[in-house]
């Protein structure tokens, strides 16, 4: 068996393999016997069909199966002999596949990359350090306090820092606009999550009250059709 390997690109390899014709013909003969076994052909008794007739009837099918088996066997034998680190199944392509001639085919496949470890004494490690100030601790404590806030209902007038639950609907020129309403919306006053004037207009309100807020959308608002409009 003749074997040659070339690198086609990156991790892809192409292996060309040649197999003696006699080796392939042995497999073809075996396949022909399998195909002919139990067959009934007019004019011949079972088991007495001449080899020439069998080959004429089943030759292409037998050779196809035999060649495929031979390519698989030869390839994996070559992989072991050449110490190839196979990373996936190959694709086979016959180059010479004719009766009486040596079989030649190529197999395209990928291999695992070669990894080389450098000596540890050549590696430079940069040690990083961080300093934590009292101000950092105070900020983190405040963040944790806000994340773990427990809210209690109150009858007092709303102030900055209070969380309100509101239903609202917005109008421009007396008409409701898309995306301008919500039900059961939780809003912390002073969080500046709404447009200017909205949260300030709720300071002093009490539970159950209704309020009318006159606000103006900012000129840089994300929706073009609302930019700079009073609502």
Image: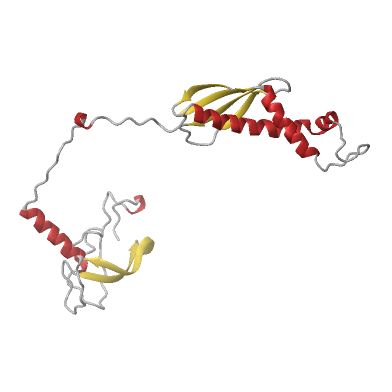
* Quadrant of residue 149 within the rendered picture: bottom left
The one nearer the camera, 153 or 115, is 115
Q: Is residue 175 left or right of residue 208?
A: right
Q: Is residue 226 left or right of residue 53?
A: left
- Please state the horizontal and vertical placement of residue 204, each as a whole percent of the image: 17, 72
The one nearer the camera, 144 or 56, is 56
Q: Is residue 40 left or right of residue 141?
A: right
- Please state the horizontal and vertical placement of residue 69, each as a whole percent of the image: 64, 34
Which residue of the protein is positioned furthest toward the right in this rendering?
A: 43
Which residue is depicted at the point 52% across and 25% down? Answer: 14
The one nearer the camera, 75 or 174, is 75
Which residue is depicted at the point 12% across and 57% down? Answer: 139
- Please state the horizontal and vertical placement of residue 56, each as a whole percent of the image: 83, 30
Which residue of the protein is positioned furthest toward the front in this rendering?
A: 47
Question: Is residue 194 placed above or below 46 in the rendered structure?
Answer: below
Looking at the rendered structure, the number of numbered marks drawn on it comes to 0
Which residue is depicted at the point 43% across and 33% down? Answer: 112
Question: Is residue 16 placed above or below 143 in the rendered structure?
Answer: above
Quadrant (top left/top right/bottom left/bottom right) for the N terminus: top right
Question: Is residue 198 placed above or below 228 in the rendered structure?
Answer: below
Q: Is residue 136 left or right of residue 94?
A: left
Which residue of the protein is positioned furthest toward the left in this rendering?
A: 134
Which residue is depicted at the point 51% across and 22% down? Answer: 5
* Quadrant of residue 118 within the rendered picture: top left
The one nearer the camera, 54 or 6, is 54
Quadrant (top left/top right/bottom left/bottom right) for the C terminus: bottom left
- Please state the horizontal and vertical placement of residue 8, each as a whole percent of the image: 49, 23
Question: Is residue 77 placed above or below 227 in the rendered structure?
Answer: above
């Amino acid at each position: 068996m003749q074997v040659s390997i070339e690198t086609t690109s990156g991790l892809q390899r192409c292996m060309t393999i040649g197999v003696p014709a006699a080796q392939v013909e042995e497999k073809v003969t075996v396949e022909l016997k399998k195909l002919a076994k139990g067959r009934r052909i007019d004019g011949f008794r079972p088991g007495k069909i001449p080899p020439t007739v069998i080959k004429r009837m089943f030759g292409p099918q037998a050779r196809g199966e035999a060649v495929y088996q031979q390519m698989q066997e030869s390839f994996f034998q070559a992989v072991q002999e050449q110490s190839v680190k196979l990373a996936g199944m190959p694709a086979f392509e016959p180059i010479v596949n004719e009766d009486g001639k040596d079989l030649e085919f190529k197999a395209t496949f990928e291999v695992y990359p070669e990894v080389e470890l450098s000596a540890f004494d050549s590696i430079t490690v940069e040690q990083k350090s961080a300093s934590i100030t009292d101000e950092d601790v105070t900020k983190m404590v405040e963040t944790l306090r806000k994340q773990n806030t427990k809210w209690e209902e109150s009858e007092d007038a709303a102030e900055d820092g209070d969380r309100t639950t509101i239903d609202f609907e917005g109008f421009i020129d007396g008409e409701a606009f898309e995306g301008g309403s919500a039900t059961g919306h939780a809003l912390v006053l002073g969080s500046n999550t709404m447009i200017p004037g909205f949260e300030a207009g709720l300071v002093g309100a009490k539970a159950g009250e209704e309020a009318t807020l006159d606000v103006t959308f900012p000129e840089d608002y994300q929706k073009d059709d609302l930019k700079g409009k009073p609502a």
